[in-house]
Amino acid sequence: MKFLIIFLFIISFSIYGADTTETFGLGFTDFECYHTSSSLNKNNKVYTNQATVGIGITHMFSASFQASSEKTNGEVSTGYGLGFFINTFDTEHFDFDLYTYLDNSYAKTFGFELNLDLKDELELAGLYLRTELSHFEETIDYSLVFGAYYSFLEDFQALLQFDMSIPESDDFNIGGLTLGLNYTLSDKLEIISEFSLDIPQDDEKTDYALMIGFLSTLP
């Protein structure tokens, strides 16, 4: 179950952490790799690797395939999933996206993202709201994500994100904060980095995670 929760987290469009959802160019045009080191303030650290291939089916409808591996206490688990998302409404300042995912354990995720942008094409700054419902066997979890981004110096983008979840069987989880910094090396390659801080509840210890990866736009 622990691997499932982490896997569902990392395949969420960005899925991939602190970022906004964007459709892919037509064809096999997106390739992404990420490494995440989490539970860094605990004895049982978790190391996760993920690869994603994105496919643009139409200008407003995309699909992705994700494969992932996780190492904990010397044990390695693997998983894979298939996702679809559609840009249902797209204007210069307002976007609305729907998405769904299914992984190899038959866990299902459904969600939407709402974007408010000061300028088109994420050129300046904006806010986004993402909500998800995840269903696995008899368990249903809800999550909310609030985020903001700011693009500067042409090639940099900073993101700040707060997440919370409402598990069906547990108490309300306030989640944590994520700070992201993305750097565009070229029109074909972007470097993604994140630092996440888990906000402790009850007797929990403060925990944190680091992620590094790249996003490549294929010709």
Image (tube, rainbow, N blue to C red):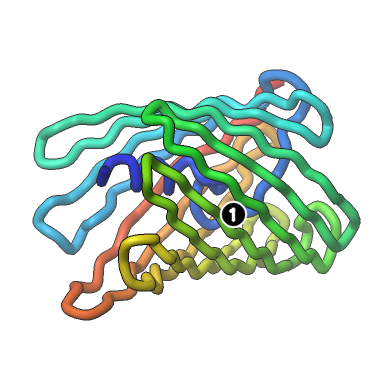
Q: Secondary structure at mark 1?
A: loop
Q: Against 210, is 69 above or below?
A: above
Q: Against 25, is 7 above or below?
A: below
Give the residue drawn at x 48%, y 66%: 163
In the picture, which quadrant includes the N terminus?
Answer: top left
Q: Nearer the viewer, residue 77 or 218?
A: 77
User: In the rendered structure, which amino acid carries the disc numbered 1?
Assistant: Asp
> Can residue 217 be seen here?
yes
Where's residue 132, x and y in %?
55, 54
Query: Is residue 76 shown left or right of residue 68?
Result: left
Give the residue drawn at x 81%, y 52%: 121
Point out the residue furthest to the bottom here: 202
Query: Is residue 74 shown left or right of residue 166?
Result: left
Where's residue 68, x and y in %?
37, 31
> Can residue 51 be seen here?
no
Point out the residue furthest to the right here: 91
Give the residue drawn at x 58%, y 50%: 183
- Residue indicated by mark 1: 19
Q: Against 109, is 170 above or below?
A: below
Give the residue drawn at x 14%, y 60%: 42
What is the crowding at mark 1: few (fewer than 14 residues within 10 Å), some, or many (at least 20)? many
Where's residue 146, x and y in %?
58, 68
Numbered label tally: 1
Quadrant location of residue 170?
bottom left
In the picture, which quadrant includes the C terminus?
Answer: top right
